[in-house]
Image: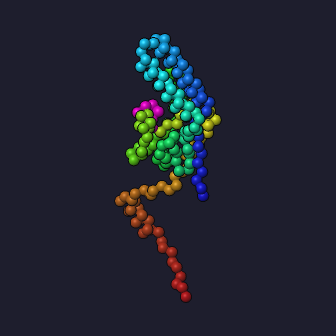
Amino acid sequence: MAETSQTFYYSRRKLGIYLLFNLGLLALAILFTWSIFPDYQPIYYFALIACTLSILSSLFVFLVRMPLAVISSAGIKIDHNQLLKWSQVKSVERDVFKHFGIERLFLRITPQKIAGYKMSFMQKLTGNSQFGPFSIPLYAMSDKNAKQIEKLIRSHLTKPAVKSKPAPKTKTTVKKAALKKKTTPKKKTLPKK
């Protein structure tokens, strides 16, 4: 049976707003560096290059569909990071990030252990922040997809484990098993003819 996966993308509308913001920033940078620092060409070129790079990167993200998360029965892959298996997930909580008075919703996924997991540069960078290394920005996707991804993740976490390991045998469990063997009568079988 083929494994099915569901891919969620960043919202085009929200990426378009980010692109327009960068275009406005470029216009303001050109205007202010020309009017305030007309004699300092390095400042003008620095502002121009920084804003142009920002516009090119936001244009690339707008034109090329970037996956936000890929969810399969095996686990979840956030952005282009390594797969986090469902058995490694300890908890998922919905949280709010407040920045300049704007509330931004995100899902924080807490793994049982991070040791042995290859983290990307961005995961290392956000590891000590409010987001954490395994977070899904719900504010960066459409409301419909945000509800759907949260429901899908929670459904994968509520599924029972495939098989749990039996409890380790201790002295008391060995004694109880021995007593049980002694007290249970053996079935008598008739000899075969």
Task: Name the image quarter holding residue 167.
Answer: bottom left
Where's residue 172, x and y in %?
37, 58
Instruction: Evaluate whether residue 101 shows in this view.
Output: no
Q: Is residue 127 above or below residue 73?
A: above
Q: Which residues are magenta?
A: 127-133
Where's residue 158, x and y in %?
55, 46
Q: Is residue 92 above or below residue 169?
A: above
The colour scheme used here is rainbow
Queried whether the magenta region covers residue 128, the answer comes back as: yes
Q: Please give the name of the residue rendered at 56% of the width and 27% of the height, measured from the top-left corner.
A: 18
In this orientation, which residue lies closer to the viewer: 66 or 109?
66
User: How many numbered marks have been drawn onto this rendered protein structure?
Assistant: 0
Task: Name the image quarter holding residue 8.
Answer: top right
Queried whether the magenta region covers residue 149, the answer comes back as: no
In this orientation, which residue lies closer to the viewer: 84 or 7?
7
Please identify the residue farthest to the left as the structure is shown: 171
Please identify the residue farthest to the bottom as the structure is shown: 193
Q: Please give the name of the residue rendered at 54% of the width and 24% of the height, measured from the top-left corner.
A: 22
Where's residue 147, x and y in %?
61, 36
Task: Name the image quarter holding residue 66.
Answer: top right
Quarter of the image where the N terminus is located: bottom right
Q: Please give the name of the residue rendered at 53% of the width and 30% of the height, measured from the top-left corner.
A: 56
Please identify the residue farthest to the top as the structure is shown: 36
Instruction: Evaluate whether residue 116 shows in this view.
Output: yes
Where's residue 53, x and y in %?
49, 28
In this orientation, which residue lies closer to the viewer: 185 or 149?
149
Q: Is residue 4 above or below residue 143?
A: below
